[in-house]
Amino acid sequence: MNYPPQGPPPGNYGPPQGHPGQWGPPPQQPLWPSQQWPPGPPPKKRNGWKWALGAAALLAVIGVTAAVTISVTSGGGDKDSIPPQDTYGLASADDKAPADVITEDPTCAAWSPINDTLAAVLTDGWDELDPKLAATDWTPEERLKYEEVGQALEAAAEQSVRLAKETPNRAMRELYEQFIAYARAFTDAIPSYTASDNHLATTAVAITHALVHICSAITYKSAQARSLLVDPPISPTETARLSDPSAPRRFMTAPDPTCDSWDRVLREFNDNTKDWQKIDKSVPATEWTPDQRAVVDGVIPTMAALADDLDKLGLKTENPILQDLALMAAQYRRAHIASLRTYQPADNYLDRASFRLSSVIFEACKAARA
């Protein structure tokens, strides 16, 4: 399996069917405050591992009918007339702002139990299976484990629909929507699974890690503290057209022209930051040795160059969701750079959020090539 540079996308739980990443563990503090969470809504029943084709066909008919209605009522051939969009009840429908470090989001509390429940299933034996084995080679026990994972992904995806609607942040909504899309794509692939389908899973899990660390940076105030030290982000060239979060599409079904560059840029950064990766991220700057301080000071220009590269790749793509992910990863990287002179363990969430966002693109490129 080809994991993204700096190891597979680790998080508060291990990567799916892989080995721990090269980076150290998250800061030695709980990712979420200790509290009791109510159970999420039960997942909708689906016909085995297949999509409800009848419902999909109905949605397609409704979509075509709506498009025709809009076309007729908006003046027909007036090219300057932009037909109104269905907002699908999205709180972020009007968010056209640049993707940036997120300092508050009301859906983070709800995401925590969804993530924790999914993580418990992903680390209950499935992470030890060989992802190179096709479904035709599974034992009954292995097949059962995949089916359990599929059910857990289905449940998490269903519960995430509401979060996609409620978040006021466009980039967070896109992350929820893409988690739903990739989780369901992997679930649907399980009956005829081949090794390449694992990239659907690693993309979905990379998204969960990104959400965890974005929310953790909010919870532990590193996002609020460090974002003030970062220059304003680059405005997007365009934003993605709104879609129904209950039936989102994968943002990359064919490799984006920037995919090769993503692979190169991330691998170069990995190769150039080996010494920094060895530093224990749970140690604050006040406790660094002179040698550790020198390593951190030396890696700052490399990180700044990476952030610039992320911006360039984001502006180069014509995929608006990929652009948002790239530009947001750049901003989290810059926020992390801004923290290094006075680094606290919670600032590691900024670093990991940037890395996970990059991992989403890296894995999505792999999945698109499959």
Image (cartoon, rainbow, N blue to C red):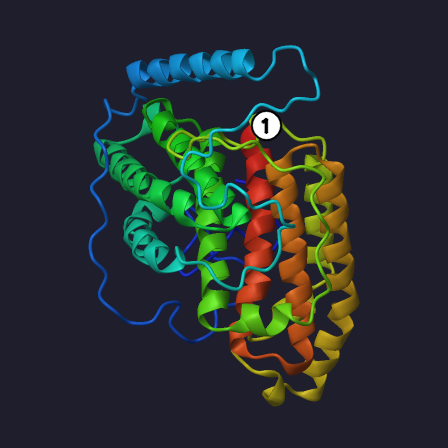
Residue 85 seen by the camera? yes
Q: Nearer the viewer, residue 52 or 74?
A: 74
Residue 129 seen by the camera? no
Q: What residue type is labelled 1?
A: Arg
- Rendered residue at 71%/87% (across/down): 290
x and y percentages locating residue 107 in the rendered image: 39, 55
Which residue carries the number 1 mark? 369
- Rendered residue at 45%/65% (across/down): 216
Residue 249, above or below 348: above
x and y percentages locating residue 38 in the rendered image: 20, 57
- Rendered residue at 45%/58% (across/down): 105
Residue 265, above or below 86: below
Residue 201, above or below 218: above
Q: Is residue 335 left or right of residue 142?
A: right
Task: Find residue 308 and report its image quarter.
Answer: bottom right
Q: Which of 192 and 72 is in front in this view?
A: 72
Q: Residues within 10 Å of mark 1 (few under 14, many from 20)?
A: some
- Rendered residue at 35%/60% (across/down): 109
Label 1 secondary element:
helix
Image quarter hosting the C terminus: top right
